Image (cartoon, rainbow, N blue to C red):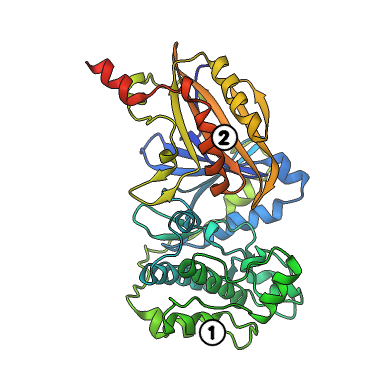
Amino acid sequence: MSATRTCVGKYELGKTLGEGSFAKVKFARNVDTGENFAIKIIDRGKVLRHKMVEQLKREISTMKLVNHPNVVKIYEVMASKTKIYIVIEFVEGGELFDKIAKCGKLKEDEARRYFQQLINAVDYCHSRGVFHRDLKPENLLLDSSGALKVSDFGLSAFSQQLRGDGLLHTACGTPNYAAPEVLRDRGYDGTTADLWSCGVILFVLMAGYLAFNEPNLIELYKKIFKADFTCPSWFSPGAKNLIMRILDPNPLTRITIPEILEDEWFKKGYKPPQFEQEEDVNLNDVDAVFNVSNEHLVTESKEKPVSMNAFELISKTQGFSLENLFDKETGIVKRETRFASNSPANEIMSKIEEAAKPLGFNVDKRNYKMKLKGDKTGRKGQLSVATEVFEVAPSLHMVELRKVSGDTLEFHKFYKTFSSGLDDIVWKSDKTVEGFRS
């Protein structure tokens, strides 16, 4: 199979970074400047069928209005006849959740630094009348320098959506991080609800586990309603005091952001955000992408890629080992890996199927792509893994594997067993390249 290069406007699309029901996020490069971006690609038909136009407009508008160093930035919105493309900041450090999954609890100073950046971002959003409503470590990204970036405004709300009582009335978000007043569904203040989620995030960063976590949803709600949690012994008195004041089940007496900014524990090492010069935000393109007019539509074009030195590729492919899922420099847990093989493509596909089926995975094959779907429900639903075979040269292939859905740690357990069944088709790059050079 020959690989092709896909371009949308001035952007060359690369590997898939994430995948959901309505959208894929792909790595992208501006071919004019060489800058890296991420592009969220949304199926226009699905959005229309599920009547999600207003929600999507809200997410795009929110991200364009919020211009803060600790919030993922949106640069451009484009559309084709079938897809909507949102060009956003590429944040290469992965999710904060991955860091917790890999390292467990963080040291207090590090947790405080992330929390300070989170409060800066949330405070700015609230000042613009924007409430996130789904704050959790999975929606907090880290850039290459370790700075925190809030992402995924799909459940956000504007102050204009408040009813006559001045409250929001949609129960949403992830229960473990949701405030009691959100779960009670009698109306809530978006500001204090977001702040509760920030308190749970701080607890998770310092403890390495959730403040509220029960398998039974009713029991979970009971604990959240009473703020029934215990701080571990290693929390400092200052941290305990602040968390207790944030996780106050009464939103009227809960600590406010101005009060947090004056808290002695919070202020230690605090650095105010450094803003770029504010620009006027134009939301005209947000409406334009849903316009049926063909005037501003872009097209996806597919081109043959530039020839690549196969041995250069293999020298960067360190075989098929569990170590590939960890970036030792950043401590980030990865969700994808790749390996090289000089076996025929059909043989590679058969071997993958043979290795996956005994582990309880259903295999869906389409051309040289496969989806491996687990038949058991794990901690975050069913584990799903996508694989694709690329031809690099007539007798050389690269195989990419990535987690599509399910729990990352369960993916690692699956991967360890699965990879041992593919040993005989993996080209061991260290030996091969050394032999080639000699």
Residue 111: image location, x then y, percent? 42, 68
73 relative to 383, above or below: below
Please tell me which residue lies in front, 245 or 164. Answer: 245
Crowd band around label 1 with a 10 angstrom C-alpha radius: few (<14), some (14–19), many (20+): some
Tag 2: amino acid: Val
370 relative to 113, above or below: above
- Mark 2 near mark 1, Cβ–Cβ under 8 Å? no
Foreground mark, 2 or 1, reads 1
184 relative to 8, above or below: below
Residue found at x 72% / y 39%: 45
Q: Quadrant of the C terminus?
A: top left
- Badge 1 marks a residue whose secondary structure is helix
Residue found at x 61% / y 68%: 177
Is residue 177 left or right of 91 when viewed as pictured? right
- Give the number of the disc on residue 176: none
Q: Is residue 180 in sight in this rendering?
A: no
Residue found at x 59% / y 54%: 60
Q: Is residue 22 in sight in this rendering?
A: yes
- Badge 2 marks a residue whose secondary structure is loop
Compute the Cα span from label 2 to label 1. Answer: 51 Å
Please tell me which residue lies in front, 324 or 365. Answer: 324
Which residue is labeled 1 in the image?
A: 245
Residue furthest bottom in the image: 253
Residue 402: image location, x then y, percent? 53, 37
Is residue 132 left or right of 399 when viewed as pictured? right
Crowd band around label 2 with a 10 angstrom C-alpha radius: few (<14), some (14–19), many (20+): some
Residue furthest top in the image: 394
Tag 1: amino acid: Arg
Which residue is labeled 2 in the image?
A: 298
